[in-house]
Image (cartoon, rainbow, N blue to C red):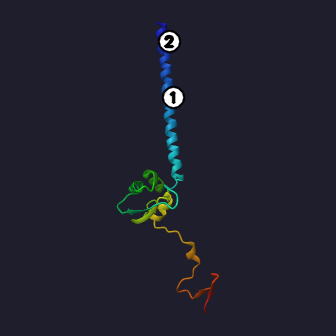
């Protein structure tokens, strides 16, 4: 009788330890996956290196931001449409994407795609210093402008 009692006690302790180990393993796994996903939100690289591949994307006014993320995933522009959706929600471009047809490149990051789809264009540095056609100035060979009177 003492042997059965001791065996039952041992099995009870072993089962308790196994349950605790499974809980710890599950918690570590969940935390690891969560950390990796959170890390990717802020550091996800582009799909490919420069020059990449241009792809046309048609964003309609009826598409939700989640559907846009799925479209970009289907076109191969992002690895995970849900991750793009979360990046968009956490960015300043949430609810600012404009419907249209865009040429996006696989070498663009998610933020660069958001900038394009929000209608924000980067100013070209060459156009800042060039005189306009209706400007009454002449440019000499060194590139300096002289105002004509």
Q: Nearer the viewer, residue 81 or 12?
A: 81
Secondary structure state at the residue bearing disc 2: helix
In the image, residue 145 lies at what x, y percent? 62, 84
Q: Residue furthest top?
A: 1
Distance, label 2 to label 1, CA atoms, is 23 Å
In the image, residue 100 lies at what x, y percent? 39, 66
Residue with the mark numbered 1: 21
Q: For the residue carrying disc 1, how many other residues have a C-alpha within 10 Å: few (<14), some (14-19), or many (20+)?
A: few
Question: Horizontally, is 85 left or right of 145 in the view?
Answer: left
Q: Nearer the viewer, residue 101 or 20?
A: 101
Contact check, label 2 and label 1, Cβ < 8 Å? no
Residue with the mark numbered 2: 6
What residue sits 59% from the left and 87% below the top? 137
What residue sits 54% from the left and 83% below the top? 132
What residue sits 47% from the left and 65% below the top? 116
In the image, residue 58 lies at what x, y percent? 38, 63
What residue sits 62% from the left and 88% below the top? 147
């Amino acid at each position: 009788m003492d042997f059965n009692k001791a065996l039952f006690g041992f099995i009870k302790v072993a089962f308790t330890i196994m349950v605790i180990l499974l809980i710890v393993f599950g918690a570590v796994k969940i935390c690891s996956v969560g950390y990796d996903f959170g890390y990717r939100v802020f550091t996800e690289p582009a799909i490919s290196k420069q020059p990449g591949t241009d792809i046309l994307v048609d964003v309609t006014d009826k598409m939700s931001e989640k559907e846009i993320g799925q479209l970009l995933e289907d076109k191969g522009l992002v690895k995970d449409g849900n991750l793009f959706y979360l990046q968009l929600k956490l960015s300043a471009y949430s609810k600012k994407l404009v419907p249209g047809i865009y040429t996006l490149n696989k070498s663009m990051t998610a933020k660069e795609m958001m900038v394009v789809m929000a209608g924000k264009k980067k100013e070209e540095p060459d156009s800042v210093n060039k005189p306009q056609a209706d400007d009454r100035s002449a440019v000499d060979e060194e590139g300096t402008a002289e105002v004509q009177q």
